Structures are given as structure tokens and as C-alpha cells.
Amino acid sequence: MQEPIGGAGIPKAGAESLFDKIKEMLPSEAGFVKAEFEGPDIIVFLKNSKIIYENETIIRGIASAIKKKIIVRSDSSALMPPEEAKALIESIVPKEAVIASIRFVPEFSEVYIEALKPGLVIGKGGSTLKSIGFQTRWSPKILRTPTMSSETVSKVRQLFFGESDFRKKFLINLGKSISKPLGNSEWFKATALGGYREVGRSSLLLGTPHSNIIIDCGLSPEPAIKGLDANNGDVNKAFPYLDSANISINELDAVILTHAHMDHIGFVPYLFKYGYEGPVYCTPPTKELAALLLNDYVKLVQRSGGTPLYGEKDIRSMLLHMVTRDYGEVTNITDELKLTYHNAGHILGSATVHLHVGEGMYNIVHSGDMKYGFTRLYDPASTRYPRVDSLFLESTYGGQGDITQNRGVAEHEIMETIKSTIQNNGKVLIPLFAVGRGQEIQLVMENYMAAQAQYKLDVPVYLDGMILEASAIHTAYPEYLKESLRDRILNNRSPFESEIFEVIKGERSEINERGPAIILASGGMLNGGASLDYFRMLAEDPRNSMIFVGYNSVNSLGRRVQNGIHEVPLPDEDGKLMPVKVNMNIKTVEGFSGHSDRRQLISFVENLKPRPRNIFTMHGEEQKCEDLARTLGRIMHCDARAPMNLDSIRLK
């Protein structure tokens, strides 16, 4: 049982005084045992948690008084034996819930119930969940079983269960650090470490005299794939400028992630490889998506003959230091900094960051990557915040000509291209980012090919690469999706499992030997992955088509093909570079991007409540960042700039 309340931090009298206050406010019959910090939260252990289950207003009153999130757990002496508790849970929960597993975590006095239909485990108004906690004294936690098998979800959950002792110690130490009184800060500054006037290696350092945090810590896609290859002259362009930040890794208080794309998370395991032991904040879905994409990066670099920047051990360490927070949950990350995530509408679990500094000293909003427009997957990015002094805004499509066509027109265009290619006895390759664009295009295919007669093409839609695994992770977190899509998944009608989709089995070359088909393959910029293999096989046949539906960075193979290159050198099966002629039809359909176009970016800023006093553009090519900053400055009558990497700005 927990009560989330954001607030002003720990009273300067110290933890003992705070815990004494909590004890005094609890009924004596609750049997107070102890209280302790656990990450950003306060955990209160009771011998008789029944009192709290019967009257939840008790904890609400305490949380309101101390301005902190409180979680109540039973003392270990009061817990029902696990086998007995398991049998009781199985008797309480309806069989229709389809329980996959029940796991007890003594270190946290918690029991995790994984089920296909968690709503039945929760019960009406939380009645079933309360009954479990009331009778067993274990704090029940619910996990959703993905409707599709997911190796990533299974492994990440097993990692956390297997390392619960480590997690407990880490969170207790983190709690002590967060609760340490810091005093008043005289200034607050931001330093651009990557992703300013460029796309890639996104990273922003925010600092006060007492606190240092980083928002995102990514890699640039092209040079990063070559890893630590000594022949890679561009390798230094892959990393954020951490060595120029004038702080050591151990001086970082926290890393805050906006979402799980590699240009925002790709450098974080490197921090752990070289000694970082602090928290990494993210939304719950970002945890699994990060595990998927980071491990794939390591394998991709190895397959390309390079040396990865880090290994699986470093990724595991990063995962174990993650602290997840839902949208709208106010969290102290130091005594003077409060973090709140809001929906960004970009990919699963993507978030804008609202950071509150000091006692009303300063507030920023960092957009991460965001979509303020229609998608089939997510609601548009949030525009309401408590206060906005400065806005850091992505500018991927912020240039003068970056106006995407109507989404309905875009969907019609892509389906017409597919239809004409199939009628010409060709194949259609759609290279996709496995997370986000992969699922968006799946929804389009399912909607048109299953429901509209003119597009029932009677050809297979093949899925290859990480798309399938990423889609499975989406089914584990339907609460982060649009309501209509969420309802379909909750009712076991997931569009990601439509009969029109066929998972690639066997060799990819076999697909090339078959008849007309649609191929959805991961590797959106053709820099590696399944899409590059299919491109190599299909490029020379003029009957085939390739449709780009997402962003291609400046130096990517996808951008060169998009710009009309007629021949490209690609490695054959033996790794030898061979020229490949590009005779296939190349099509770009812009309406499917997970980024906002120029009009949507401007509309987002105009609809922000309250309006920002300063705007800093980022995550865009140089001209786009500058164009958008000039336009927003004129429209909003505020200071709007396009900082460069290594610029340091005093915000307060």
C-alpha cells in the first residue's frame, strides 16, 4: 500500500526526527517497527498492516504532512509463509485471470503476481488486491503477462527477482543520498553535451552547486555501430562530450532517460563500465525496451567486426540501477531536484521531463523526442505543467519545409505504393525502427488489409528483426497506449498478432525466392539489422519498392538511398564489399514519423500551459534548430536560441 505525494524534501532535523513523526501519527495498534529510505520513497514497516488496509486515509494524512511518498509494508515477522500465501492467492484470484507466476521477494516483503488479465487480480475498486495484502500481509504487486511471448520481458523480470538483495541495498543507499540536506543553491546551469545542432548522442548536463544530473546519454547511430574499431575515424563523434563537463562520473547524482532509442540511452552502460553507481530514472516500459536495444547494439557491433563500447555485464548493471516512475509521479532525485514525467507521444513509455529546482527557484521542461499529433499508438504529448521557465525542445523536423502531409493521405499513399508493387509482381521492403514505427506500420497494415476490400492483397506481411519482440513488450504495457488500442489488447484482440502477419523463419534468402510480399524489417536507416540484408537482395530488381517512413540521419545509408544514389558498396556473405545497383523504386512517406513536424512543434509551444520564458532548440540538424528558434522567438515574444554542443548556459 502506498501514497504518492510530491513535496519539499526532508526536514533539516534529519531522518530520525522524520521517522519519529511518522511513528507518532500512526495508531499504536499498527505496531510500528521501523521506517527507512528506499530510493526516493519512505518505507514504513508494521506488525499489523491491517489497520492501514481498513483506513487508507491514515497514510494519506501522513504523506500530506511530510510531503513524501510513503509505502507501507509488513514486518517480516508478520508475513504468512510463502507456500501458504501462494495457495491463498490462487484461491482468491479468479482462474480467468490466468496467473502465470507468483513470486515472493522477502527483501521487500512483496509478492509479484504475473497474470494475463491483471484487472481480475486487482478486482473491483482494488478489492481483490486488498484482500491479498490483508490476509497474507505480503504487499501485492501486479505484472502483466505479454500476450505475445517476450524473451526480453522474461529475462529482465528474472534479473530483478534474482538480484533483489542487491536492489535493496542499492535503494537504501540511494535513499540516504537523496534525503541528505543540501542547502540553498545560488545558481542553476545547463551544459550541452550532445545532440545540439545535430541528431544523435543526446545529452544535457544540469547542475547546481550541490547537484549534477544528466538528461539522456546517447550514441550517434552510424559511428557507434563501428564501436571501438581503431579504423573508425568518426568514432569520437558518437559520444557525448562527458570529458569536457568538468565533473567526474562519481559526481553525477542521477541519469534521467526520456525514452529508449539508442541516441538517448546508448552511452549509459559505458558510464557503469567506468564506475558510475548511481540511479537511472525512466518509465517502466523504457526498462525493457532499453534491455532489448542495448543488447542488440552489442551483437550488431560484433557482427560488423567492431568492438562494442561495453558488454552485457554493463547493461545488466545499468538495468539493476534503474528506478522507474510513471507519468505524473513527483519524485525527489536529490534534496533540491524534483522530477516528473509526462507523456511525450513518441514511443512506448517516452516522456517529457519536468524538473523543479529548489523551493520554486527554477523549472524546466525537456521534450526528449515528442509527437504532438495523431498516431495510432499514443495520445499526443502533454502540454500542461506546473511551471515552465525554460523549454528544451527537439527540432528534428523544425525546418522551414518540414511540413508533413495529412496522416490519412500518407496512409493511402503507402497502401497505393504497396498495391501497385504487388500487382507488378514485386516485393515491398519497409525498413523500420523496431520500437515505435514498427508497431505503427503494423497497425496501418492490419487496419487496411484486414478491413478494406481494395487492399486485401492476399500476400504475406513478413516481420523480421526486433519488431516482433518490441511488439510483445507493447502488450505488457497497454496502459501506455491509446485507449482504443489498450482495450483491444486487454480483450485478447491484439492487432500485433493479426493473422495477416507472418514471422520470418529460416533463411532470409528464401523470402527473396518466393512471390510478392510485404517485408517489415528492423533497421530504419539501413545501418544494419534485417532491413540491410533485404535491401541487398531486393535493390537491383526494378519491380521491387522500398518505402521510408521515418527519419534518416545525415550520414546514414538510408539518407543516401533516399537522396537518389544509384549504386552502393555492401558486404556480401563473406564480408567482401561488392557494388549493388539501386534499381528498385524508392519512396518516402513522411506522415508516419514519431517526431512532430514544424507546425506541430509550434502548436505544442503555443499550447504549453504556462508559456515558457526561454526556449532552447536541440535534436535537429543545424539549420532546422536555428530556423525553429528564430520562429518561436518571434511568435512567443521570448528568448529562443539554438545552443551548440559544449555551450554552457546559466539559467538562474
Image (cartoon, helix red, strand yellow):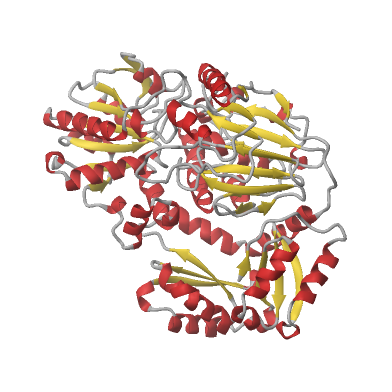
**Which residue lies at the image location 61% right of the left edge and 49% below the top edge?**
340
Q: Position of residue 359 (x, y in %)?
A: 77, 47
254 relative to 20 in the view: left or right: left
- Identity of the residue furthest to the right in this view: 13
Q: Position of residue 461 (x, y in %)?
A: 23, 42
Find residue 418 and report its image quarter. Answer: top left
Residue 76 showing in the rendered view: yes
* Count of marks, rendered view: 0
Q: Quadrant of the C terminus?
A: top right
On screen, 329 above or below 523? Answer: below
**Which residue lies at the image location 30% right of the left edge and 33% below the top edge?**
430
In the image, 540 versus 448, the foreground residue is 448
Q: Position of residue 459 (x, y in %)?
A: 16, 41
On screen, 573 above or below 564? Answer: below
Q: Position of residue 457 (x, y in %)?
A: 14, 40
On screen, 7 above or below 126? Answer: above
**Which residue lies at the image location 46% right of the left edge and 42% below the top edge?**
345
**Which residue lies at the image location 48% right of the left edge and 80% below the top edge?**
89
On screen, 519 above or below 48? Answer: above
In the image, 435 versus 32, the foreground residue is 32
In the image, 420 versus 448, the foreground residue is 448
Residue 597 showing in the rendered view: no
408 relative to 225 in the view: left or right: left
Q: Quadrant of the N terminus?
A: bottom right
483 relative to 451 in the view: left or right: right
